Amino acid sequence: MSTEASTTLTETRTETLTETSGGTGRTMPAWRVTAAGEPAAVMRLEEVPVPSPGPGQVLVQVGAAGLGLTDAALAQGLSLQAPPPPFTPGLELCGEIVGVGAGVSQYRLGERVVGQTTLPSGSLAQFALARDQDVFPAPTALDDEPAAVFHIAYLTAWLGLYRRASVHVGEWVLVYGAAGGLGSAAVQLALAAGAKVVAVVGSEEKFKLVRGLGAQVVLDRSRQDVEAAVRELTDGKGVQVVFDPVGGPTFEQAGRLVGFEGRIVVAGFASQQAVPVAPEQVRAANFTVLGVNSALYREREPELVQRAHADLIALLDAGALRPQLTETLPFGQAPLGITRLAEMSTHGRLAVSVSSSVGDDASG
């Protein structure tokens, strides 16, 4: 078939699907946040219209949804990204494109993608919307569930370590929250860059998980003095790079453990405790504080994000990366997973299987 004929066929299929996907009475099961509060109390399973992709958007049939701390914050009303209720949560997905809006040229129907949704149409539904610049070719090496938790965490860690901190071979990198999705991604990417990793975790179970990632040193803060251990390890000089997705007390500690001309990467606030940066401390110790926000790169340097994704796929295919998916939940148990995230009782990543279970347990 010629390229022109193939394009015409794709456009015809797209127009047909778009017309039948929205405004014609077709519905789908979706979890909805009905008010700000604890996830289990405010999430309801409802039958809602299938959305239609607008200009620059794609409609994705969700295979799996990745769950993260942001989803808990969305339900609790603690995230600035939260739209007015009711809305469908779920920022991450892996699925198949089944509709494209006006102006979308880089994707076609049937392509399998990973990426970030466009709220209020999140991934905890049979279909979700995303901007075309926010989805990327799915890694062929991963099934839907691990693929759903791959993109955002590894992109953020890549930007933090490779772009912002310019981590070098042989440097010591201290990673807080190393058993979490973002922390475990940072551990693997630091090792892939030839750095040496000190990983900090909060329990024996998490210790075992991170030890399996290959970190040279794993410290259980519930049983060990992290500051004393790092000072001994570095002969009192401190580490060259700190990757901190936790914030609060860990950021304060990072300022005491980063070495001369070191870099602290602020990658998140899992602790929900903001700590002001003291300029006099930064000057006295001669270190740099670097923020990393992947959303800004999507807006301002989308080409860099494309290159980062391609690099991450190459590292994945080479065996250097392994998403830490510790549990997959059926669609009907999505609120349970978000509740556990809100309670900080998880490690690794959680995913929700949508396409394989939405018909079986959508009734909750």
Image (tube, helix red, strand yellow):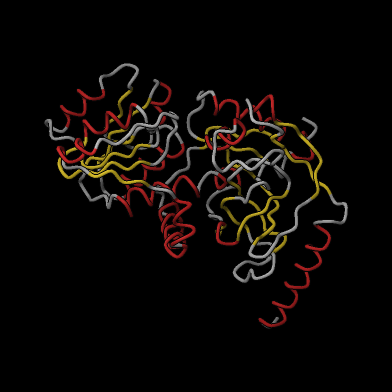
Task: Give how far across and how far down residue 75 sits, in percent.
Answer: 62, 33
Q: Is residue 44 above or below residue 91?
A: above
Name, please, the residue furthest toward the right.
25
Residue that appears at 25% across and 35% down = 278
Q: Is residue 352 above or below residue 169?
A: above
Residue that appears at 69% across and 64% down = 100
Q: Is residue 32 above or below residue 156?
A: above
Q: Nearer the viewer, residue 174 or 262?
A: 262
Quadrant hosting residue 103: bottom right
Quadrant hosting residue 342: top right
Q: Nearer the viewer, residue 185 or 279?
A: 279
Task: Give how far across and how far down residue 145 sits, in percent.
Answer: 59, 43
Residue that appears at 39% across and 41% down = 267
Quadrant hosting residue 65: top right
Name, please, the residue furthest toward the top.
223
Q: Is residue 217 left or right of residue 359?
A: left
Q: Quadrant of the C terminus?
A: top right
Task: Give how far across and how far down residue 337 sits, in percent.
Answer: 61, 29
Task: Give how far across and how far down residue 116 sits, in percent.
Answer: 57, 50
